Amino acid sequence: MNLYAQKKRWKIVLAIIALVIIGASVYYTNLLVNRFAMQERIQIRVWADAVQRRASLMNITEAFFDEVREQERKRIELFASAYRRLLADAPNENLNFYLEIISNNNSIPVIITDENRHIQLGANLPPHQQDLDSLTDELITEYTVYDPIEISLGGTKKLMVYYKESVIFTEMKNVLDDLVSSFFNEVALNAVSVPVIITDSTQKHVIQFGNLDEISMRDDNFVKQQLDEMASENMPITINLENVGQTFIFYRSSDLLLQMQFFPLLQILIITLFLVMAYLLFSYARRSEQNQVWAGMAKETAHQIGTPLSSLMAWIELLKMRPEKIEGVDEMEKDVQRLETITERFSRIGSSPVLEPANINEVIEETIDYLKKRSSKKIIYQLDIPNEPVIIPLNISLFRWVIENLCKNAIDAMSGQGTIRLKMHSEDRYLIIDVQDTGKGMHKSEFSAVFNPGYTSKKRGWGLGLSLAKRIIKDYHKGKIFVKSSTINEGTTFRIMLRLK
């Protein structure tokens, strides 16, 4: 037991060292991840501030264009007023001032018509519109973007002044529209790879998006889920743009950051998986090596016992040939036969045993009868087995070894005085055999350890008996053996489970 305890302590020490190394690695990785996350959040904040500044600049530009548009409207109103005065004022009045106002309009396209839409005057018109006599539906649509200005000439006569934005203003407005479009594209396809969704004022209709799967964005449920996640992580940026209206920019941390946050957990999983695989491979290699050593030792022991055993058998035969009967020769012959059986068992270790149908009742009874004659009279054996034969595949020699080993351990646990009860019954598809003693018992922590090679509570012993018993039941007979129950100073019950079919 001391050797096993020492090995167990070393395992605990190595496990603690491994946990410390894993903990340090995970801690450092987590520290790097947190730093990365902090840097990305700073970049996202800088990006969000830049978006706000760009939006403010766009709004200022929009305000400028609104002012230009208002100025053009005033110019056309002044143009209309001058034209009316030019028509209505007396001939002797100085008209140069009004003519100058009219002639100074060299950029805003203007069409003046009578009440029947016959064109009276046109200024700054494109070549294909200069020879028209009256307004067409197409021209009305084109020149009524802004409300026309009415010039009253007295009575029912009136003139209508139609105009549209100047060429320069239109070109500048197109540039602004391109800026707005490129602004949304740049926000969506940002350099920091932040998933972005730009919506209208309803926060439902998507204007633009970036760094998100295009196919998934066709699903309304996916879009709603993304918007909710983004809103919970960051307050959406609100932007009011002329001709666009109120828009909201939703954004969240990049997918890379989310993946990096789970990296320490993935690292723990990978390390744990590696350690488990390494442990299993090491345990398998160790068990294989132990099996080879035990098989070699067993075969060598059988070989060493074989020579003196043959000699003892010969001497017994000589003693039996004497005319006078020598007391104890028959028992000596039984013990020699017993040694021969043990030698046979040792020689079979390491090779696949042959299982043959056998009556397990007879095997147990013969084993107990043998033990009774060779154990203290203070040991009481109780058998509780069925009367009818129970036939199952057995290797009789190895199975008897298991029963003998359990009984001998029980005798040692009871210090040579107590009761051993062996009970057998069927349960589902298994044949249950319980071996119960009234010994000193064991702690629950030892239930599994007693089957480990080298574990023993005796001052003298190799700690291989129960380990070999487990191998015989589990590997050779495809059954189970375990400690069913144990109470300190009251006893222990071992259970064997063998398949009936």
Image: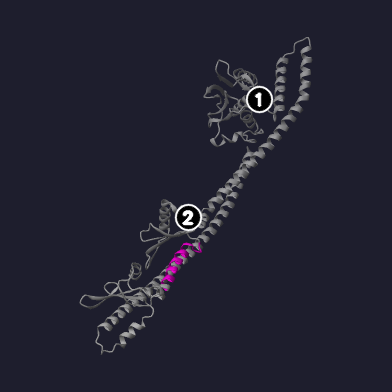
Front residue of 283/99: it is: 99
Instruction: Classify 328 as above or below 106.
Output: above
Instruction: Mark 2 or mark 1: name the one nearer the start of the chain.
Output: 2
Q: Tell me if 229 is positioned left or right of 77 in this view.
A: right
Residue 326 drawn in magenta: no
Q: Please identify the residue farthest to the left as the structure is shown.
A: 155
In this figure, which residue is indicated by the disc labeled 2?
A: 214
Quarter assignment of residue 501: top right
Q: Is residue 197 visible?
A: no
Instruction: Classify 306 as above or below 261.
Output: above
Quarter assignment of residue 142: bottom left
Q: Quadrant of the N terminus?
A: top right
Picture coordinates of residue 99, whole percent (x, y): 32, 85
Front residue of 429/459: it is: 429
Magenta-highlighted residues: 172-192
Q: Which element is circle 2 on?
A: loop
Magenta region, main secondary structure: helix
Neighbourhood count class around disc 1 (C-alpha, 10 Å): few under 14, some 14–19, many 20 upward: many
Picture coordinates of residue 134, whole percent (x, y): 32, 72
| Residue type of the residue flagged with mark 2 | Glu
Front residue of 322/148: it is: 148
Q: Which mark is residue 398?
A: 1
Q: Is residue 82 visible?
A: yes
